[in-house]
Image (cartoon, grey):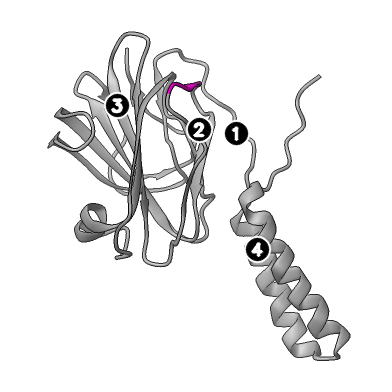
Amino acid sequence: MKEQHIPVAREGYPFIAFAAFVTLIFALLGYDIIAFWAMLLTCFVLYFFRDPSRIIPAAPDALVSPADGKVILVEKVFDDRFVNEQVYKVSIFMNIFDVHVNRAPFPGTVHTITYSPGRFYSADTQRGALENEFCAVTMATDAGERFAVVQVAGLIARRIVCWAEQGDALSRGQRFGLIRFGSRVDLYLPLKTQLEIATGQKVKAGETVLGYLS
């Protein structure tokens, strides 16, 4: 029997319950217009924390997107913060209407998890990428290739959630965290990666193939 999945991230339960409670109070007090807008807010919070199932590509060397959103950057850089080598950097921006649950792009073992508090500039800017709060999950494949998935908080994001722990073995497309209310995810990939994406492309976490890592 397949495992049943509730399509709402558990971190959203307190926000959904609070919004629903406020809606109920306004309704009981007879403030119909306010209750209506509170109900719409409750629906939006429920929508924001949705966590739909995804069809994970079967190709053994497929590299999938770690986030829903739009690709805003694909470039070759020297990364001196996470893997300390020349890499491809791929940045995906999530707006408030995207699914915010993040997934592992490739099978591997979590090597290190680095969290850094920071500021809350717009996540689609260079300043936001360098100075905002972030949580970096550095992983190694079975072949020894290292890559990093970095959750970056955005302008109105106020908490990064990472469920992964050091030593965890993650499968392709496995959920490992989320970011609340607008953000971005940066990927730092080995140069041997064959990328199949371009800036401006819309992607889905765990489903869209970004390229191949043999």
| Residue matched to label 2 | 206
Relative to the observer, which residue lies in front, 118 or 176? 118
* Earlier residue among tags 3 and 2: 3
Q: CA distance from mark 2 to mark 4?
A: 25 Å
The residue stretch that appears in magenta: 167-171
Q: Say whether residue 25 is left or right of residue 85.
A: right
- Residue drawn at x 47%, y 45% is 68
The quadrant the N terminus occupies is top right
Q: CA distance from mark 3 to mark 4?
A: 33 Å
Q: CA distance from mark 3 to mark 2?
A: 16 Å
Q: CA distance from mark 1 to mark 2?
A: 6 Å
* Earlier residue among tags 1 and 3: 1
Q: Nearer the viewer, mark 3 or mark 4?
A: 4
Q: Are marks 1 and 2 in contact (CB under 8 Å)?
A: yes
Q: Say whether residue 139 is left or right of residue 51.
A: left
Looking at numbered disc 1 in the image, what kind of residue is underneath it? Arg
Looking at numbered disc 3 in the image, what kind of residue is underneath it? Phe
- Residue drawn at x 44%, y 62% is 158
Residue 109 vertical position relative to residue 182 in the rendered view, above or below: above
Secondary structure under tag 3 reads strand
Q: CA distance from mark 1 to mark 4?
A: 24 Å
**Mark identifier at residue 15:** 4
Q: Nearer the viewer, mark 2 or mark 4?
A: 4
| Residue matched to label 1 | 54
